[in-house]
Amino acid sequence: MLDAVVVGAGPNGLTAAVELARRGFSVAVFEARDTVGGGARTEELTLPGFRHDPCSAAHPLGVNSPAFRALPLERHGLTWLHPELPMAHPFTDGSAAVLARSVAETAASFGPRDAGAYRRLIAPFLTKWDTLAQDFMSLPSTALPRDPLTLARFGLAGLPPSTWLTRRFHDERAKTLFAGLVAHVMAPLSGFATGAVGLVFALAAHARGWPVARGGSQAISDALTSYLTECGGTVHTGFEVKRLDDLPPARAYVFDTSPTALARIAGFGSFYDGYRYGPGVFKVDYALDGPVPWTAPEARIAGTVQIGADPAEIGTALRAVSREGRAPERPFLITVQPGVVDPTRAPEGKQVFWAYGHVPNGYTGDLTDAIERQLERFAPGFRDRILARATAGPPELAAANANYVGGDIASGATSGLQLMLRPRLTLAPYRTPHPAVFICSSATPPGPGVHGMSGHNAAKAVWRRLRA
């Protein structure tokens, strides 16, 4: 009998398996698709030689993850590549605000009236970032805070809506960049704890950047799989689990799946009926005949580029999706251009480029034209560079990854209390009605992102049971 079986070979499932295997437990992973990866994959979606990331592409939470940093992933092939700028936010006048590794450079891009306010916002947390990240990403109950005073101070700053936090800024540049950071989790800017979201992304950039994985995000999943194998674990692909009886006998079962799928497989009935799924995304992967022709020079050297003219435009787009149930005319866009630092992703002189906008959950329309109209505002001539495109709306995303219910790449709404307390209001989020069944997906704290901490935290709960 195995000690543990893990269902789902995404970053969280693989991390949970690694944490158990490296402690001497026998572990097997079962994945429905033919390859491992979940939200960290790389595929040729458009033309031969163009290697795209179907989901996550830039990894501020991955490079800062306490779980990943404790594992020898570099020895197993993972190399982080850092663009000259982690992120840029261009404006229609050809200028840009930036999120640089340097706090001073970032503050200077906001203008003199807001530079000091930004430095004062960041300073109390940056020198204690490693401890803060460990505390923040290990909540609610897997570990006692190492620095409770800093965590409490962070909570005071971050738990109110981001619109409260940005009142300290005078000009639109700082407010717009910060609004874009919050919009990464597809939550209204006025939502609970959205200030914390913006702070986490900013601090992550200053601490260790927003890198891409050399060769694509698949390198993260492959490194985890390689280390798992070294530790004695096994991975079985092409194995869809429809009920618990499909799995071999084990002392514990760990699911890197949506709560909906877990309830169906394990027969939990209505246990997760209160869990909410959030907006979906419409994503376009491009093969380009050269770099994106950004008007702002800063955007040409940034790995990630946020697109939204001002806080009002970003807020309008988020409200259209989350409250009005419609696709926005001017969507807020997150874009990634790995080619600024990784020439292996496309043939010489060419580029891969990735962009998505938010849409209602289950949206079946086509946002391609709206996305490209937005891009043309900040990169005139963009359409002339397109060699091929691959589009994926909510139905396609859900078909490729069952955790993305209705196209929700966060595996659950990141608004209200569910931003932090998920998948239920409980201090034991990784446990289920069955004492031997656990959940470790992004539907559990600390939530979405390629960081493995949900798997790491769930593994703690599992090995405590196994040792008991």
Image (cartoon, rainbow, N blue to C red):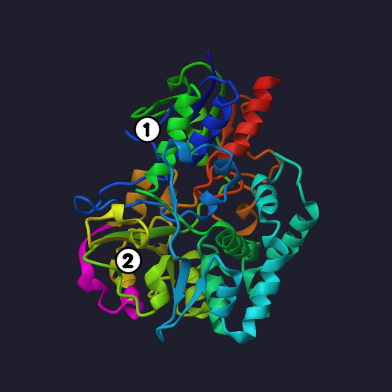
Q: Name the quadrant of the C terminus.
A: top right
How many marks overall? 2
Residues drawn in magenta: 374-390
* Residue appearing at x 39%, y 55% in the figure: 362
Q: What type is the residue that disc 1 sits on?
A: Ala
Task: Pick whichever, 408 or 124, lies toward us.
Answer: 124
x then y, percent, for residue 286: 27, 61
Badge 1 marks a residue whose secondary structure is loop
Visible residue check, residue 327: no
Is residue 389 magenta-colored? yes
Q: Which residue is mark 2?
A: 367
Q: Position of residue 398 (x, y in %)?
A: 38, 47
Q: Image check: 86 left or right of 190?
A: left
**Mark 1 or 2 closer to N-term?**
1
**Which residue in the protein does label 1 denote?**
32
Could you tell whether 244 is left or right of 415 in the image?
left
**Which residue is pictured at 28% across the width and 70% down the height?**
369
Q: Quadrant of residue 357?
A: bottom left
Nearer-the-camera pick, 450 or 123: 123
Q: Residue at x 54, y 81 (%)?
A: 173
State how far apart marks 1 and 2 are (Cα).
Answer: 29 Å
Near mark 2 (Cα within 10 A), the count class, few <14, some 14-19 or many ≥20, is many
- Tell me if 156 is positioned left or right of 64 in this view: right
**What residue type is disc 2 on?**
Leu
Residue 333 location, x and y as percent?
41, 68
